[in-house]
Amino acid sequence: MRLRRHLAAAEDAPQSPPDAEFEGEHAPAESFAAGAAVFQIVRTLLKWVERYERQLSGAGMVGGFAFDNWNFRRIDMPNTQAVFAGYLSLAAISILLLHAMAEREAHGRRMPRWHAFLPMVAQFALGALWSAFLVFYSRGAVLGASWPFMLVLLAIFVANEVFKKYHSRLIFTAVLFFFALFSYAIVTTPILTHAVGTFTFMLSGAIALFVFAMFLRLVRRLGPAQWQGARWWVAAGSLAVYLTLNAFYFANILPPVPLALADGGVYRHVARHGGVYQAAEEPQTWLTLFGVPPTLHVPPGGALYAYSAVFAPIRMSVNVVHRWERYDPAAKRWRTVSRVFFAINGGRDGGYRTYSLLRDVSPGDWRVDIDTADGHIIGRLRFAVVPGKSALADEARTLK
């Protein structure tokens, strides 16, 4: 009877659901399986990054170009300067970490797998900086002045295939970092001094050399053995960059950033009405959209107007020149016909607007260079003049 009562009590007791009986036993196994799956994914990703390190470094650099071309608007805005400083810091930190890990590896310690991300991070940061420089150099300026940066871009892609050893890559990235540092100083120093010119350029070079020297001291502390084999190459490469940029500047090849030609054109007539500039424009063919110089019909004794809107940072006042030049076919050279000087003030998004007038324009090939007072070109307007009147009526245009 007592046994039957125990059996009946056991049958009447509430039963746990079937899944609940094994829930506590399955949870650790399921968590372990999930963790193992995540670990395997991360491990596979790191192996893939190591395998395609060079290609990913190039892709990271191109990604930096694309992002900055879409994002940047004005060089003198605090958020733009913050992005510049962030990219420089990111490049410096990644180079220093990679150098420190190489020093550890030289002493028999294994590198962590995540070190494969560092070259890609450095290339992305440097590529983003160069893209920003190209954006600001090419906005309304003569595109030929930006060719040194395109050459450096090509050198980066080639170096990803050529420089395979760590010492070579350290030299390469350190020299490129100095190039980015000097380029940033050239762009930013005029914003702080509110002036452009030779003194400002030389000051930017001195600032870049000082900051780079501090960076190299950190490199030496983190990896003295590795640094000994690379220091003279880094010094030679950095000196070459410094001398090259100086040569570009004094040969008037380097544009006078942060100045830029925001808008410009040659018209039959320009007049200011209040805060609006109105122009009479001769209709042109669709070829001018692809860089073909416009053709303007000018009767004997007729005049033309050159309009320019030059962007300058806030609180900057500079002198600019409209230099009218006509091509001399006999001498095969450009001859200056007229120079008109202006004082402009910075701060306007669309640039400081002004125009010049040239009377009695003769037929031929012409150009108007918009320069700084010391001869550095900001932009160029090319056009051709033919005698007579146009068969089409002039179009009214509101200038930016």
Image (cartoon, rainbow, N blue to C red):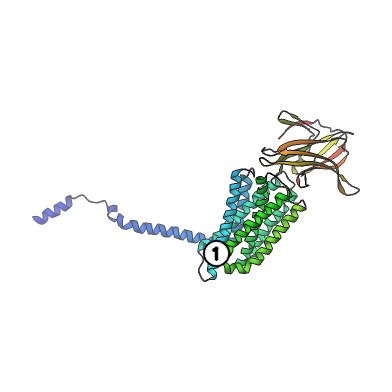
Q: Residue extending furthest bottom?
A: 108
Quarter of the view holding residue 235:
bottom right
Q: Is residue 400 left or right of residue 222?
A: right
Q: Is residue 59 above or below residue 258?
A: below
Viewer-side residue, 339 vs 30? 339
Q: Residue extending furthest top?
A: 274
Residue 78 position within the rendered picture, expressed as x and y whole percent measured from the top left = 60, 44
Q: Residue at x 50, y 61 (%)?
A: 44
Q: Residue at x 53, y 67 (%)?
A: 104
Q: Is residue 70 above or below residue 391?
A: below
Q: Is residue 16 left or right of residue 74?
A: left
- Regarding residue 60, the answer to whether it shows in the image is no
| Quadrant housing the C terminus | top right
Quarter of the view holding residue 348:
top right
- Regarding residue 9, the answer to whether it shows in the image is yes
Label total for image? 1
Q: Is residue 1 left or right of residue 355?
A: left
Q: Amino acid at mark 1?
A: Ala
Viewer-side residue, 216 vs 154? 216
Graded by Cα atoms within 10 Å as few (under 14), some (14 to 19) or many (20 or more), the crowding at tag 1 reads many
Residue 33 position within the rendered picture, expressed as x and y whole percent measured from the top left = 39, 59
Q: Which residue is mark 1?
A: 100
Q: Is residue 28 left or right of residue 331?
A: left
Q: Is residue 396 above or below residue 322?
A: above
Q: Residue extending furthest right?
A: 330
Residue 385 position within the rendered picture, expressed as x and y whole percent measured from the top left = 85, 39
